[in-house]
Image (tube, helix red, strand yellow):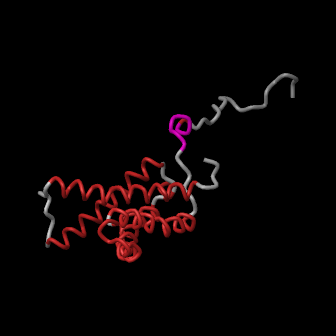
Amino acid sequence: MRAGLRTESWPRKAPKTDYMAALAPELPKGVPFTRALGALAVTPLVGSVILAITFLPRVGSAFSIMVLYIAPFAYATAAAFVLPILMVWPPSRRPSYVLAAVWGALAACGAWFVLASQQAGGFEMSMPRPVAIGLIWSGAMPGAVSRMFYAWLVRRGDGE
């Protein structure tokens, strides 16, 4: 071989660049399913307590019984509206706080509408304004706080 000659083949290949990684923001990493399931096991109870607090003036000393009465509905809501998504889509196991609040509020309102339709014998969308506001307050707020607590639990120890 002569000095100064390159031994590369011609034409030279361009270096591989991952343009999609440069353009797309980094997706949040999902947490392990067992860790997400552990956090999901606690958070419906938080929503049950918050919802029972709204009934505190009426139930008084039966507060703990009210929490135990609400808890099965909260756990059923988590099993129906949250668990399937956590199983299928790993990034959803570590949501942002805003997404967690919206997701929890929508899941709780969905559960309230299902329960209300079962009591009324079908969906009745024309309800009085005070009833609708009460439904949103008593349904969405505990769901949002519960899901934000979930987001805090799964992020705990991540350095965020």
Q: Is residue 61 above or below residue 125?
A: below
Nearer-the-camera pick, 57 or 86:
57
Magenta residue check for 37: no
Q: Position of residue 60 (x, y in %)?
A: 35, 71
Query: Position of 23 compared to 129: left or right?
Result: right
Query: Position of 23 compared to 103: left or right?
Result: right
Q: Position of residue 73 (x, y in %)?
A: 34, 72
What segment is highlighted magenta in the picture? 20-26
Quadrant of the rendering where the N terminus is positioned: top right
Nearer-the-camera pick, 20 or 64:
64
Q: Is residue 141 above or below residue 68?
A: above
Q: Position of residue 111 (x, y in %)?
A: 30, 65
| Residue at point 57%, 54% (across, down) | 155
Magenta residue check for 21: yes
Q: How many marks?
A: 0
| Residue at point 24%, 57% (across, down) | 134
Q: Position of residue 151 (x, y in %)?
A: 50, 55
Q: Is residue 96 above or below residue 112?
A: above
When asked about the image quadrant of residue 107, the answer is bottom left
